[in-house]
Amino acid sequence: GALTAASFGRVAGANERLQVACIGCGIIAGHHLSHLKDAPDVEVAAMCDAYLPRAEQYVQRFNPKAKAYQDFRRVLDDKSIQAVFICT
């Protein structure tokens, strides 16, 4: 399909990594993230959980550079996030 002018600016280049976030930091999230953390074209950029210490724990486990959130709306407001895993 054709690209619109708005979507053309969001096309990832060959050297860019997809910025993903995970909402919900439980067992299922750990399973998904364990596969993503070693993917060369993906960067886990944010974790979100209603219990903030768990989100912070997952940040340390999967990417210490990632952001930890308690409110999922902050994840959705973050324009650098390109994809979200909802694992609740």
Image (cartoon, helix red, strand yellow):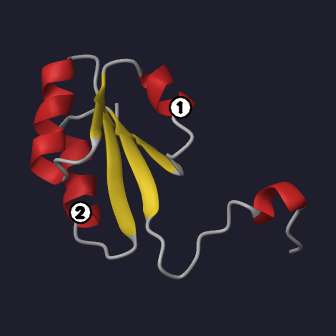
Q: Is 74 rendered above or below residue 8?
A: above
User: Could you tell me if the residues under marks 2 and 1 are in contact, i.e. CB atoms within 8 Å?
Assistant: no
- Position of residue 35 in the picture relative to residue 18 (left or right): left
Mark 2 or mark 1: whose residue is earlier in sequence:
2
The disc at residue 76 is 1
Q: Foreground residue, 14 or 38?
A: 14
Q: Which percent across, then down, holds residue 11? A: 67, 68
User: Which residue type carries mark 2?
Assistant: Lys
Asked if residue 40 is positioned above or below residue 67 in the image, the reply reads: below
Q: Which of the numbered marks, if any, corresponds to residue 37?
A: 2
Task: Give the image location of residue 71, x and y in percent.
Answer: 39, 18
Percent position (x, y) of residue 86? 42, 38
Q: Residue at position x 16%, y 40% from top?
A: 58
Q: Amino acid at mark 1?
A: Leu
Q: Secondary structure at mark 2?
A: loop
Alpha carbons under labels 2 and 1: distance apart: 21 Å
Residue depicted at x 48% and y 71%: 16
Q: Secondary structure at mark 1?
A: helix
Image quarter for residue 17?
bottom left
